[in-house]
Amino acid sequence: MSSAPPAVTRRLGYLLKHAQLRLAELAEPLYAPLGVTGRQLALLALFGAGPAQSQQDGAARLGVDRTTMVALVDELEAKGLVRREVAPGDRRKRLVTLTPEGERVRVAGEEVTRQAEALLLEPLSAEDAERLRAALQRVVRAE
């Protein structure tokens, strides 16, 4: 942790932010061999879950604006990890699906993410790690 005073380092916002930064620090080197970033991997997980979704739906689910989503999908498409298809019955809507390579990267990325999370949670007992996950899920669901 930094040399910030305890009045700061005990704040929940500070702790959550620095836990996320630490997770990214552990995960990004593991993602590099896959040729993707954590953000790109999150999109592969989103678009690889279930039936094809539109870019708009994906943007809404991740809480990003549509312009940002288009740019992110452009990156994945340029890497050959996703393709856009016209939605049946709505020529204006583009559905995003994973290519076979995108699916391979998604699966590999899930494993690497588990490894990074395990490294982050290593100082905790298994029970404490599970309690932390469960507590954060309850907080996030309360949105």
Image: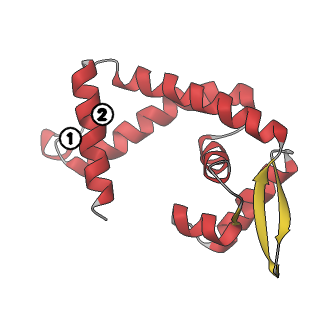
Verify CB contact (< 8 Å) between mark 1 and mark 2.
yes
Q: Which residue is mark 1?
A: 9
Q: Residue at x 58, y 26 (%)?
A: 112
- Residue 35 visible in the picture: no
**Dividing the image into 4 quarters, which one contains the C terminus?**
bottom left
- Residue 21 visible in the picture: yes
Left or right: where 88 falls relative to 135: right
Pointer 1 or 2: first along the chain: 2
> Mark on residue 130?
none
Percent coordinates x, y for residue 98 in the rendering: 77, 48
Q: Residue at x 29, y 18 (%)?
A: 123
The secondary structure type at the circle numbered 1 is helix
Vertical arrangement, residue 96 with respect to residue 94, above or below: above
Percent coordinates x, y for residue 142 in the rendering: 27, 61
Q: How many marks?
A: 2
- For this rendering, which residue is in front, 6 or 112? 112
Which class describes the residues within 10 Å of circle 2: few (<14), some (14-19), or many (20+)? Answer: few
Left or right: where 8 falls relative to 36: left
Percent coordinates x, y for residue 54 in the rendering: 70, 68
Q: Amino acid at mark 2?
A: Ser
How much space separates mark 1 and mark 2, taking CA atoms?
8 Å
Q: Residue at x 68, y 37 (%)?
A: 106
Left or right: where 23 falls relative to 38: left
Q: Quadrant of residue 141?
A: bottom left
Q: Residue at x 84, y 45 (%)?
A: 79
Q: Amino acid at mark 1?
A: Thr
**Dividing the image into 4 quarters, which one contains the N terminus?**
top left
Q: Which residue is mark 2?
A: 2
The secondary structure type at the circle numbered 2 is loop
Percent coordinates x, y for residue 108 in the rendering: 67, 28
